[in-house]
Amino acid sequence: MITIDKFNFAGKKAFVRVDFNVPLDDKFNITDDTRIRAAMPTLKKILADGGSPIIASHLGRPKGVDPEFSLKHILAHVSKLLGVDVQFANDCVGKEAGAKAAALQPGEALLLENLRYHAEEEGKPRGLAKDAPEDVVAAAKKEMKAKQKDFAKELASYANVYVNDAFGTAHRAHASTAIIADSFDADHKMFGYLMQKEIDAVEKIMKDPARPFTAIIGGAKVSSKIDIIENLLGKVDNLIIGGGMAFTFEKANGGKIGNSLCEDDKLDVAKEIMAKAKEKGVKLVIASDAKVGDSFSNDAKSQFCNANAIPDGYMGLDIGPKGEKEFTDVIMASKTILWNGPVGVFEFDNFSQGSKVIAKAIADSTKNGAFSLVGGGDSVACVNKFGYADKVSYVSTGGGALLEFIEGKVLPGIKAIRGY
Ligand code: AMP
């Protein structure tokens, strides 16, 4: 497999799949350009070599051509960050895109319109009636798969080389994230810098972590984290469980949890996880106290209590001071740390203290030499909110992709390039 830093793009056209799915306000201004900035090293390297990037992305979830989701909204900003006037093709396929790609000169860049204007990108038929007969659905799916291949081939035809730098969509087998790679031989397809960094960071912790290895899994629901926890139980030394999901564990242990979030159909799963942890010698850490409120709101009347003795009418919305110390002690003694999911309702200032303390502990432990990876939606929002993003080793840009990678799944976007 070739790597981007060894490849000379001089005179080459590179189809670069990026993840420019950025949030826009109601005037179509970009409210957070992190994802665009994250792809800049790859795009700049191609330009600096004397190559021409043909940049492709999705934006939002359009169901067809929809100006609201046009990549034109971000064109000026991409040009500014890249330092060249990026050209634009009003459709990602068709005559105009083909002609503009063909005419592209070394040092020039082209941005294609939203890939998801076409159902072929995701490969799912659109507009089927909900009650369509099974055979009609099956035929539509088959037809779409064939069209998806042609769509991927047309995208591939613009370029000599394929670069995937869209880690955020690596868990999807879409035309531009996976199928397109079939049109390039092993010497002409590669990961971009961002994608490579994401893969390296996850594989560093999952394959050969310095020990002790601690995972902090928080968030709302056990159900969304079961696969991750299962995979982590075979790898970590300590598993900290926080957030709303901790109360399902408390209840499974016979605790009184008041109105706290609980998935009653997952009590057995929680018991199994606790038994498996014991069997594998993993230390399972759940906060012994909680900050509880009498409603799900920042202004709720609050108090501290033991996490297994929550008064009626109250719900656990954060860990308490004992939990903060218990979690901090484990984190400070760790050499590898993975954080996914806040340990409380960090969006409410009055219940954000626990998550803030965890973010700080991870930053302090990192300063002492630990490798820390923070990823998956809300924990990234946490380190950003509390100002620790540059004090941890790596902040992942991937949500679902990161979670599936940690679950141990093979991601189609990665497999398409390196074969596994
Ligand atoms: P997830 O997307 O599963 O990682 O969940 C993140 C969400 O979990 C955040 O919006 C938090 O506010 C929420 N959360 C964390 N702790 C609690 C809790 N004790 N009760 C309810 N929601 C929580």
Image (cartoon, rainbow, N blue to C red):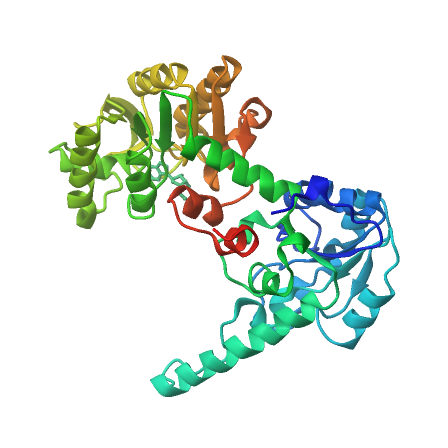
Residue 347, given in percent of the width and then of the height, sits at 46, 36
Vertical placement of residue 388 versus 60, above or below: above
Q: Residue at x 31, y 39 (%)?
A: 229
Q: Nearer the viewer, residue 265 or 294?
A: 265
Estimate the x, y position of residue 409 in percent, counting from the top left.
40, 49
Find the residue positioned furthest to the left.
254
Locate residue 6, reporting x and y percent.
Answer: 71, 41
Position of 245 with respect to 117 (left or right) is: left
Q: Is residue 354 above or below residue 104?
A: above
**333 over 55 or under it: above or below:** above
Residue at screen point 16% across, 34% down? 275
The answer to which of 226 and 409 lies nearer the viewer is: 409
Residue 242 in which image quadrant: top left
Choose between 306 and 174: the one closer to the eye: 174
Whether residue 275 appears in this view of the structure is yes
Q: Is residue 38 left or right of residue 334?
A: right
